Structure formats: structure tokens, C-alpha cells
Image: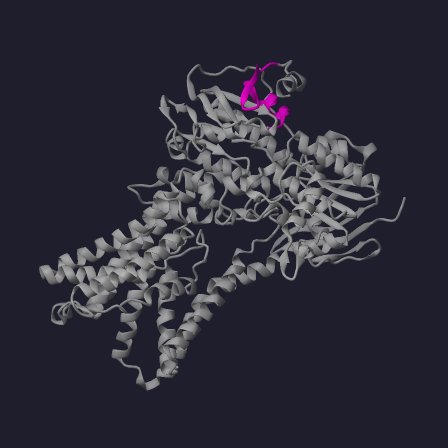
Amino acid sequence: MKKKINLKSKVVEIVSLVALAILAVTYLVMMGDRLSPYMLQTLLNQTIITAVVSTGAVFIYTTGAFDISLGSAVAVSAISGAMVYNKTESLFLMFLTMIAVGLLIELIDSALAAFLNLPVFVTTIAMLSVLSALVKIMIASGGGAKIEVPRAVVKTLDSVGLKVLILVVFIGLCIFIYNYTALGRREKFLGGNPICAKLTGISVKKLSILAFLIAGVGVGLAAFLTVVRAPTITTSTASSIGMDVIIAIVFGGMPASGGARSKISAALVGSVSMVLLSQIMVILNFSAGISQCVKSILFLAVVTLSGLKGRKAMLTR
Amino acid sequence: MSEPILQMQNISKHFGLTVALDHVDLTVYPGEIRGLIGENGSGKSTISSIAAGMQPATEGTMKFKGRDWAPKSMTDALEHGIGMVVQERGTIGGVSIAENIFLGNIDQFSTAGFVNRRKMNQAAKEILSLVGMENIDPALPTTVLDLQDRKLVEIAKVIARKPDIFVVDETTTALSQTGRQKIYDLMKEQKKQNKSVLFISHDLDELMEVCDTLTVLRDGNLIKSLTKEEFDEEEIKQLMVGRELKGDYYRSDYDGSYDKEVVLKIENGNFGEELKDLTLELHKGEILGVGGLSSCGMHTLGKALFGAVPLQSGRVTAGGQTITSEKTAMQHKIGYVSKDRDTEALNMDASILDNISIAGLDKIAKHGVITKKNERNLVKEQISSLSVKCREPKQAVSELSGGNKQKVVFGKWIGCDSEILILDCPTRGVDIGVKQAMYQLIYRMKKEGKSILIISEELAELIGMSDRLVIMKDGAISGEVTRSESLNESAVIGYMI
């Protein structure tokens, strides 16, 4: 039995990479001669935003919690930054505002859970509702159905090099924190056993809040990248990110329960996989609804498969 | 002699390259209480779990009541006559006590898809009465029960199915003397009905007292089976470890001296019924024992001293500073080894490396950065000095035997340079060889000037190791004795009851 579990465990370990390889080959074969630098750039644009949010969110997932309001948080951060730009015409202040709003949203989210002793999913559900409403209110306050930053202003920033640099630096920083600092190591330990973590001097509340704050940085960066890519913000901007992040992280090989086997790479692997999958479904002329259903089915399949790892051998000797 | 009820022949079990059992034969007769003894990792739990349907054998045949025996699961085995109470936690926390008892069989209380909870709770109450828990409301969530009561629920659940063979795997280590007596009575009742018991324990005294026959295993091999007349404590110990146990078991000196400096103190501590205006001091270089019945409050005292229980009044201080949380306790170099090892002391999801290094991260970090080299050095030092039997530091801690898991917990606190150690039942579920090593380690730490508070339900251990021994009863200290050659259990028991 143990042998079987080990085998399944190994399959689960590599399944995300195998899935990514299959999706990549399928995409390349389907595109054939139509594959162009423009298409690759589109892929990259889509991947980077999901990957940045997912990378920050890995910290939340590691502790065994999850946040479904990340998409709305990106939208609110983007709108806030755009509004500040329109008032000050400073790209720097726009960027700072986006990061600050991302941090503030995640701070409120996690602090409410910590100090009211509520499960995090409860506060994120409430936050999703509040943020979605806030997006509508903020856009309506501009007197129209959208808020814009002049395209000419952000055009200079819309380069593949800058976007890749932001992603690489952020992922690098997160990998460093995750594996080489006490904070990251404690986050993983907390996810594995919160009771033991507490009895090892780890402050569960403090670490949960810090995990959300790191995710908040990812939210702010994603808001910036969103505005650089599409400076017109509407109520549907970033609306699918929340769900995409959840699916991407799990699809990338992150255990749904967090803990010691959590890994930053899951965010990148999952994000690329999700974008490739979306593109394949576009080529196959799947409607948006059908695409969402396919993603959800895949999500369930991956969670079921990854659950095998959680089934510990019943005997420890 | 009657026909055997269970015959296991040539049983082998492999976990990858590890051979847990190597062609072992085991026979159990009706009306027999057979003990299984051996060091951690000897294979005693493995062979009994194969009989009880927890896992299949890699090789070998089994016959139960004269027929081929290959249970598909523990439930299957229980339905057909072999029921096992496992060493690890066997109840689910999120559901009621009654639901735990009837797990997998709740349909018997269903009508048109609706569960008749009143009927289920009534049936659960009757089952609980088998282990003297008739006063417990079965509708309560299992989380309200302590470790001992959860174990008793598991025992009741198995015994209610009237198994032909009742397998008890190191269960008594989680029980107080009262709880142990209940399980001994159940075993005797089983024998009276010409049914059998397979009893696994590290406590040689109780095995010799309760069992008719004893089978000794070592490193996955059957070493010898002994009848009651052949029981000899020293011989059994030698058969278990394969060598003569050299050196002292407990410490051999009767010098109960220690420094005057108070390193940890609780003053007028109150916490419900468990701590009542309790004041206690631990000195530098002292081994302070705390004993009593399981429910006397001593386990809560251990947690309170580590800042893990918020006192209703009174305070805990170390070096003059108030301990308000686990973190402040650790800042004052206090370590805490919980009784509930798998839930509170270890992260079973993580590796040996993660579990040992987690408390010492601040120590090994240079300018906030943890290097793999520093971390590995810290962990390897502990693995080596504590002789943790493992393949590599990255091995999952869940794969270790009970004794080696406990060594990892010790390594966690020693590795972060703890000067004060609060040890709650430190030798629970560990074999005689590991116990001896731990006693020697505790004594060595005392000699190094460290302060150790041992909370234990084993009086022999407390008397054998402590400089000073306090006994608790109903949340307060009922007696105190100091180390002396003439100190014995009967002198202490009077304070407990």
C-alpha cells in the first residue's frame, strides 16, 4: 500500500510539469505556421499578470488559507492608481498608489480574520463583495463606464522586457523569502500544523497577516501591469483573475492544504498552463462559458489527484 | 491445546527497500492474551496491523478461524472478528463522539435518508458505558475529549463489535492508571469468553502482568516466544535489544542538589479547575518531577509554564520577566515537549529537517538569511547526537517510529539552545532502549546546568530521575518529596489519591 502511495505521490509531483508540457506541445501543434511573435507576446502578457498575483498568493495558500477576492483587489488597485495619475500626472505616484492599495486591501482582509477570529475564507468572501461594489462605485464616480489613463503615457512602459523584469524580480524575491528567511519557513510550517507552529513560538496571526501583505504586493504589481497593458479600466477588468489564480496555483502543483510541500514554482507553472489552456480553447472555438467549465473540471481533477498525497500511510513504522 | 484462531505464516512486509517484517510466523489461540514486544521499528505494529486489515502483507499466508484470511480493510476485519485500537489518533475531531463510534455504520440509524440522532446517541451511550464513560454526552464533538478519553472511545468502538481477537497497539501509553485498569479488565473479560487479545506495549511490567504468552520481535524478525512460566525481565530485555543493556537506566546517584537560582516560576496561577492558586519554582540545574493522576492539572501546568495557557490570575516568570506567550517563553530559552506528540509537537507533513530547524531559525540565520549549510549542520548535529534512525534529514518525520519521532522533538529544543525544558510525558510510547538514552540525556543536561521539568504519569520514572518531586491533585500541589534512596512509589501514591 505504501509503495502504491509513494508511486502516486511521485506522479502527483510531476503531473503539473507533464500537463504543462502537453499543453505547450498541443498549442504549438495547433498554431502551426500561425505562431508569430505577436501571438507569443499576447501569451506573455496574459501569463505575467496571472503569474504575479499567483506568486504572491502562494504565501496565503501555504498557510492553508485562500483568497478569492484577489481579482477584485487588482481592479480596485488599478482604478485607484489611474485616478491618482489623472489627478497628479505622475506615473510614480500611480505605481505607489497601486502597491499601497493592494497592501491595504490585503491588510484589512487578514486583520479582520485575525482579530475577529474568523476563518479567512469568510472575510475574503465579504471582501469580494465589497471590492466588486467598490469597482462599480469608483468607475461611476468618474461619470462614465470606464476610467482611463492616456495610452500615450503608458505606451513607453508596455514593453516585454519591463514586464518580464517585474515578474522575475518579484518571483526571485518571493523564492528568497520563502526558502531562505525565517518568515517563509515559518509560513510553510504553519500551513502543515498550526497547533504545533503555535507551540513552537510562531505567531499564527502575525504570519497570516504577513502572507496576505506579500500577496498585496503582487496585487499592486498586477494592477500596474494591467493598466500598462490596457489603460482603459472597466467593471470587467481583472474580473477573472481571482478564479484563474486559484486554478493556476493548484494546477501548478501546490497542495490545496498548503504546508511543507508548497512551492513558489507552482504559481508560474500553473499560470503558463492556464494561459495555454485558454488559448487552446480559443483555437477550438469554445465559448467563454464552456472554457470556464473545462477549467473547473480540470481544477477538480487536480485537487482530487493531489489529495492522494494527503492520504498518509496509516502505519508509521 | 485447542486449534489456533489465527495463524500467520511466513509473513513479510516491505516498504520500498525497507524490510519491516522478514518471514515471521505468529499463532494466536482462543482464550489467549498474547503480548508483542520489541524496540521501535521491530515490526510488532506491522504484523498486528496486517492481521487487522490495515495493510496487506508483501508475502505469506494467514488463516483465521480455520479459513484463509485476507481482510480488505480494518472495517472488513472488524466485521469478521479482528478489531484493532491503533497507537496513533484514531478518532476524527470535527464530528460527534457518537458519529465517531458509528463511523461507516451510521446508515443503521437512517430512515429515508434522515439519521435518527437520538437513537444513535442512545446506542453510543451504551457503548461508552463499556469503558466507564457513561457520563459523557455522545452528542458532543470529539474535540472536547482529552487524549485519554478519545482513546477510550476508540476502545469502546472496537469492543462493542465483540471481536474474536482484540488488538491493542500501544494504547495504554495514552491512559492513566484508571484507564489502563479498564483496558486490562476488558482483556480479562475477553479471555473469560474464550476470545483472544494481541497486546502491544513498551511497558514490560504490564505485559508480564497481563499476558499469557509473549512474542519478542527485533528488526522485523521473530526472536522468541515465551510462555508465562518463562517470563524473565532481564532475558526479555536482552532479547528485545539483542545485547545487554549496559549502564544505568535511571540516574544512579542520590545527590538531589541544584543551584539556588530560580529560572522559572509560577505564582498563584489559576486556570479553571486545573490550576488552583498554584505556586512552583524550578531551579537552575534541577530536575523537577511533577506527578499525579492524569486529570490532576499537571499537563495544563506544563502548558502554562510555556505561556501556552492564559492564566486567569497569577503569573509565570523566567529571569524576572513575565512569560505571556510561547514566543516570550522561547526568548527566555524555554522549550516544551508536548504529551500529544503527533498533534502538538511535530509537523507530520514536514521533514525531520524542517521539524528540528524550525525552533532554531533565528539562531542559524545570518543577517536574516538562512543558508542550507547552516541548517543542515544544525540538524545533522542533532540527528547524530540523539542517534535518530533515519535515511536522511529530508525524510518525512511521519515515517519514523515513535521513539525516533520523540528524539526529533528533543532535537528541536536542544538545537535552539534551550536552557529550560518542560517535558510532558517524554517517554510515552518509546521503547526501553530509547527510554534509557533519554534518561541519560536528561541527566547530562542537568549536569550542564540546564533545568528540566518532567511531567509524567509513570511514578518510577519520576522517582528515578527527579531531584525534587511534587505531586498534584485537583489542580493544586498535594505533596513534595526530595530525592533519596529510600523514596518509593507507595510514599508518593498517598499524595495522589
Residue positioned most to the left: A88
Residue positioned most to the bottom: A33
Q: Position of residue A161 (x, y in %)?
A: 21, 67
Instruction: Name which quarter of the figure residue B200 lies in.
Output: top right
Q: Is residue B480 left or right of residue B37?
A: left
Q: Which residues are magenta?
A: B457-484
**A295 relative to B431, above or below:** below
Q: Which residue is pictured at 59% across the width and 29% down the height? A: B295
- Which of A94/B354 is in front? A94
Q: Is residue B197 left or right of residue B408?
A: right
Q: Which residue is pictured at 35% across the width and 84% down the height? A: A32
- Which of B336/A29 is in front? B336
Q: Quadrant of the N terminus of chain A?
A: bottom right
**B181 relative to B74, above or below:** above
Query: Is residue B55 in view from this perspective?
Result: no
Color theme of the render: one colour
**B68 relative to B417, above or below:** below
Query: Is residue B455 in view from this perspective?
Result: yes
Q: Is residue B381 magenta?
A: no
**B195 relative to B229, above or below:** below
Q: Is residue B235 left or right of residue B479?
A: right
Q: Position of residue B212 (x, y in %)?
A: 80, 37
Q: Is residue B481 magenta?
A: yes
Q: Position of residue B105 (x, y in %)?
A: 67, 55
Residue positioned most to the right: B1
- Which of A102/B31 is in front? A102
Instruction: Name which quarter of the figure residue B464 lies in.
Output: top right
Report how many numbered discs are placed on residues in the image. Answer: 0
Q: Position of residue B373 (x, y in %)?
A: 38, 45
